[in-house]
Image (cartoon, grey):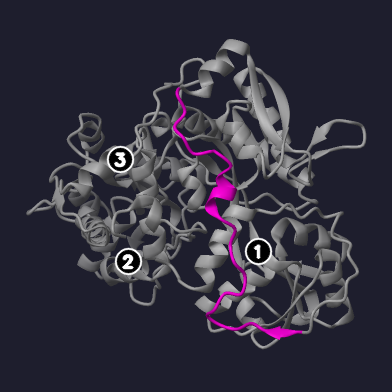
Amino acid sequence: MIASGARQNLQKLFAVSLVALSMTACTSSATPASPTVIPAPTATRQPQSAAASSDGAGSQAAESALLAIRDRGTVRVGVLYGYEPFGYLAPDGTIKGYEVELSREIAALWGVEIEFVQVTRQTRLRLLQAGDVDMLAAAVARTRDLEAEVEFSQTTFAGGYSLLVNQSSGFDSPEDLSGQAVGAEDALAFAALQAYQEDNSTQFTATEYAGIEDAVAALASGVVQAVAGRREHLMLAAQEKTDTLILEDAVMPESYAFAVRRGDVALRDLLDLSLQQLNSAGKISPLFTANLYGYSADVFPALPGESELTLATFPVEMAEPGALLERLRTGDPLRVAGLSLSATPAVFDGQPIVDGYNRAVINEMARRWNVSVIEIPDSVENGFDLLAAGQADVVVGVRPSLNLLGVYAVSEPYYARGLRLIYIDDVALRGINDLEFKPSLAIPPIDISRDLIDDNNGFPQIQESESLEDAFEAVTSRGVYGVVGDEYTLYLMAQAEERLKLHPDRYRASGYAMAMSRLDPDFLALVNFTLQDMSADGTLTRLQEQYFKPYLPEGEELEAYELQPWPGDAAGYLQMGY
């Protein structure tokens, strides 16, 4: 697990309390407590009971809410009426906010009306489970505990607890504030500081305040050197106090997402597809900026590909949670596709490099679950067919795309793979945009390589080749100016010929994930939690350095791919001996 002691108690506290701290309500002038050097590792605040948090939610839905939305022509969305900037009742009686406007755009995309239903943090899960609302757009934090209660869409806002500092302070990260006085906007922010120092060599001298305004006033007067608070609170504070800024590295990251009833993977996946389509249409960024105090939108992971599915055609099968976990518990092996495992790979084939990493990741996951593994060879091309036929449980090394939504579930990405440009060292190529009127060669993945050249040159002269040996011959014999393709393939070419030079830029690096049945959200949760923990404890970075770094050109550093763990505890929920 990612931590113990203070962090576990804190994560449960976040997951079950989720107290609404209104920006306008935090005006108490109470005298703060004396500054406290946060002790480690003992937690000082006890979580509420899980029973109090679930409020009756968590049972499996009987059918997808998509059926009711189609029949009535209306989607019912549960929103908070008093949590600006996500959902609030404006003076003119209208409902406004970032998640409110996102929901309106989704309803318009679906061609249905929208009905907003007021919920509170205490009633929202119960109303969702009872079917009084189809979905929640109510600042629901994606936590491990709530994964057992609902299905989450992709992240709509990267929130959590961050630090506000004066622009002139010179502080660039939380570590820079070690030994400094930090004001916490409330008890949860204080606990976030405590959890952060438990995982890092940082010791804050912290004071808990009665609200964000008191904490910011302490910053302005020099009593504290930073303020810890929820990111959305700090965004407003930074707008009002313009000589401040929010540090990029959060103390406790925590993401908001839309939530639907447990088992309703159809509505979950349609929401993901709709968010992707709205982003591609350029509609999410303006909504973010308009509602989040003028800030630029968070980076939204746009997926490639296309989908023809709509509200009317989206598959509505309900989930069968726990099916694979039960089989694994009884001793059945985990069947893994997406591997080549060729004893005689083609020259310059980069797949064995990726195979080595994927095998190591899967074997470490299986070790943590105490299960055995069956690797299916020659399953790179037909991995999805094996998954659909029930002959594989998971496909590794999958590039997420829109056409997978509604067909398979896809994990959090756990490594990145991109394109590179290679050429003879005495050829003066300044980059991918320097191929105007110059013969170039696109190799696998050909569609992405060709598109990269096309997008960066007005008059390219692109050839294509599936043969990696032919591509090597073409570039070394000066038949083309440069070759664009998979970075691992080009690493091998560069090692085979010292005259070849890799351009330092890495193009269109994309996260790669694992695919599995969309009807088993429990297994998806187990995979995500395990990957997150392997990232948090350094396992993924160590494996990337072991399998990828030896192929990098001399002097280049590996860009380690890290995942952000969701707060909460997974062990009791999954019961995999994990």
Reading the image, the residue beneath label 3 is 464
Q: Nearer the viewer, residue 135 or 556?
A: 135
- Across and down, in percent, residue 241 comes to 87, 66
Reading the image, the residue beneath label 2 is 544
Mark 1 vs 2: CB contact within 8 A: no
- The residue lying at 81 percent from left, 64 percent from top is 212
Q: CA distance from mark 1 to mark 2?
A: 29 Å
Residue 202 sits above or below residue 496 on the image: below
- The residue lying at 26 percent from left, 41 percent from top is 324
Q: Nearer the viewer, residue 102 or 30?
A: 30
At numbered mark 3, what does the secondary structure look like: helix, strand or loop? strand
Left or right, 540 with reference to 141: left
- Across and down, in percent, residue 380 comes to 21, 42
Q: CA distance from mark 3 to mark 2?
A: 30 Å
Mark 3 and mark 1 lie on one chain; the one further toward the N terminus is 1
Q: CA distance from mark 3 to mark 1?
A: 49 Å
Mark in the foreground, 3 or 1: 1
- The residue lying at 86 percent from left, 55 percent from top is 25
Which amino acid, by three-letter code, is at mark 1?
Answer: Tyr
Q: Which is the main secondary structure of the residues drawn in magenta?
A: loop
Q: Nearer the viewer, residue 452 or 531?
A: 531
Reading the image, the residue beneath label 1 is 161
Residue 339, numbered label: none
Left or right, 534 with reference to 155: left
Mark in the foreground, 3 or 2: 2
Residue 558 on the magenta span: no
Residues in magenta? 35-62
At numbered mark 1, what does the secondary structure look like: helix, strand or loop? strand
